[in-house]
Amino acid sequence: MSPPTAPPSERLRILLAEDEPDIRQYVRDILAARDDVDVVEAPSGEDALRRLEHEWFDVVVSDQRMGLVDGLAVLERARERSPDAPRVMITGYAELELVEDAKNRGHVDRFLAKPFSPDAFLDEVAPLLDTRRVRAARQLAFDRALKVP
Amino acid sequence: MRFLLRAGLVLLVTVAYGALFVLYYDVPPGSYEGSSGGAMVVVIAWFLCSIVSGWLLGRFAGAGYGLGIALLMGPLYALRGEDPNAYYFSAIFPTTIAFTTLFSYLPGTISDLYADARARNAALERTSAALGRSEAMFRHFAERIETGVWIMEPDARRVTYLNPAARRMFQVPEGETVGKDLTHPDDRELALSSYAALRRGESTDVEYRIHRDGEVRWLRAQSFPVVDARGEVNLLVGLIEDVTERKERELRREILERRERLSALGTLVAGVAHEVNNPLTYIMGNLELAQRDLGALRVEPGAEASLARVGRLLATSRGGGERIAKLVKALRAVTRPAGEGSREQVHLNALAANVHELIRPSTPPGIALELRLDERDPIVEGSGSELHQVILNLATNAIQALGGQRGRVVLQTRQEGGKASVSVRDDGPGIAPEAMSRLFTPFYTTKPEGTGLGLSLAHAIVRDHGGDIEVASEPKMGAEFRVRLPLMAPQAVTA
């Protein structure tokens, strides 16, 4: 199956893999101020993997500690499916070795340690979103110029 | 029986002489030759009687009887002075008795003495051979076994025998029985009291340490008095075994069990910390978001006070949440499941700050808890969670040492030369001098419910990290424990 491609839109899509509903809601609230972002929630690692097969995401954010499929597995898969999408891992646990390892292997771009404040989240994620926005806009202009439907 | 024989003999001899005297007095004086043959018969009978009686008395009654009768005999003959021969008789017959007595007595006695001496000699030889065999057997055992053997005569006050194994244990040169006293200073009292008990006649069985070639060895000494048939102590004997390996095994097992317990506890606390962290994330975050929304809120006139109050409530709640967050962070550092021998960069400042954070909530209000950090941020290599355990243990001890009194506990990091250190100082009662030398001894504790393992475990961990723990204490002036560790080389430090 070919990797999903970016839809012709200026809106950005974030995949949020997190098994705790209240944290998902919290992240939504943090991003509520940004009207150019759609947060796609995955309540489990398995669900996140399924979505990664078919859907396009600009940024992938995943909690590390989830049920069967953990954050590292989700982000590894995300790297394969959408190599350009930056990956953020939320660690609730001081998993130093894991963090080092994941960083060295290039699976993860940013880390966010729990508990994180809204500003801490935005500090990590907003620059990624902005970069993606610029790229998406450029891509859109490029596509329009080439008349690609 | 022998008495009856003697009495009979003496009686017989007396009767015989009595008879002979009667016959002798019947013989007219001077008529021993010629016509009267009777007188000659008496003299011959007398002579024969002297020989026989002398021999019999000497042989069977004893020389004393024969000589006694001989002495009595002389004056009797002399009584008949009218007989010119009486004087000859008084000299000849007693002399005859005396000589026969001696001749019959002496050879018997000499041969008896000779036989007796031979018998004694043979017995001595047998005893000596048995002793020799016993000695050889003892040497055979004592010179070969790995157990140390010493023997002491109670009056000698020093060892009279040491087997080669004991010689090796105590480094006593060949040919000597006393070497340097290697007993560990902490165990001297034990060794002395055990020796005193031994001298009182009690058996003892103690385990103590010695210093040998720069290492500490554990010895098990069983000593007992050897009591003779009269119940008197005639030897003190000791058996000594090197039990260092067993002791070390026991200690390792104890420390391992302790670590396992801590590790199980760590896993539990880590799990709890994680579970607390998740809700804490959105509690804190939501409070912050709510505060922001509150700032943008416009309310009807008159409700401003309520709005301000909600703002205060939110701020207080966030403050509480932040305290929980700090505590969870500190707990995580302690309980991070570090693999055996895991090595990482440990920032001592962060570690000390973390311990400070962790014990602050439970520190009694009268105790000032201070944190002094070396601005060079000393870094060591090792297991953060294990070192954390050590400092936490020392800090907890310091607070307990103050025993609820007002006081001060200072956590301080330092960097000096190639060493980094974390010290914990209190101004409590200090450490009793007798406790000082045993601080790191496993199972030694001064606290009623203490396990006596905290400091020994701390010591083991610090030693594993190539460091040591220095203790300084003055009575009534408090105590300072300083954990010194090798500073990590700057080029090895990675960002």
Image (tube, rainbow, N blue to C red):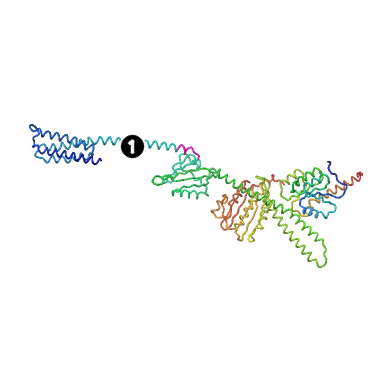
Would you place residue B33 above or below residue B238 in this image? above
B379, A95: nearer the viewer? A95
The reply, left or right, for residue B146 in relation to residue B268 is: left
In this picture, which residue range is highlighted in magenta?
A: B139-146
Q: Secondary structure at mark 1?
A: helix
Image quarter of residue B480 = bottom right
Q: Quadrant of the N terminus of chain A?
A: top right
- Which residue appears farthest toward the bottom when viewing the image? B302
Q: Position of residue B243 (x, y in %)?
A: 53, 43
At label 1, the amino acid type is Arg
Give me the chain letter of mark 1: B
Whether residue B376 is visible to the viewer of this picture, yes or no, is: no
The extreme top residue here reads B34
Camera sees residue A62: yes
Residue at the image position 31 percent from the left and 36 percent from the top: B117
Q: Identify the residue shown where x is 17% and y is 41%.
A: B72
Q: Position of residue B53 (x, y in %)?
A: 19, 36
Instruction: Give yes or no for residue B223 being in the magenta stretch.
Output: no
Q: For the residue carrying disc 1, how many other residues have a C-alpha within 10 Å: few (<14), some (14-19), or many (20+)?
A: few
Magenta stretch: dominant secondary structure = helix
Q: Residue at x 85, y 48 (%)?
A: A134
- Residue A86 lies, in percent from the top left, at 80, 47
- Left or right: B90 in relation to B181: left
In the rendered view, tell whether residue A104 sits above or below residue B407: above
Residue under pointer 1: B120
Image quarter for residue B215?
top right
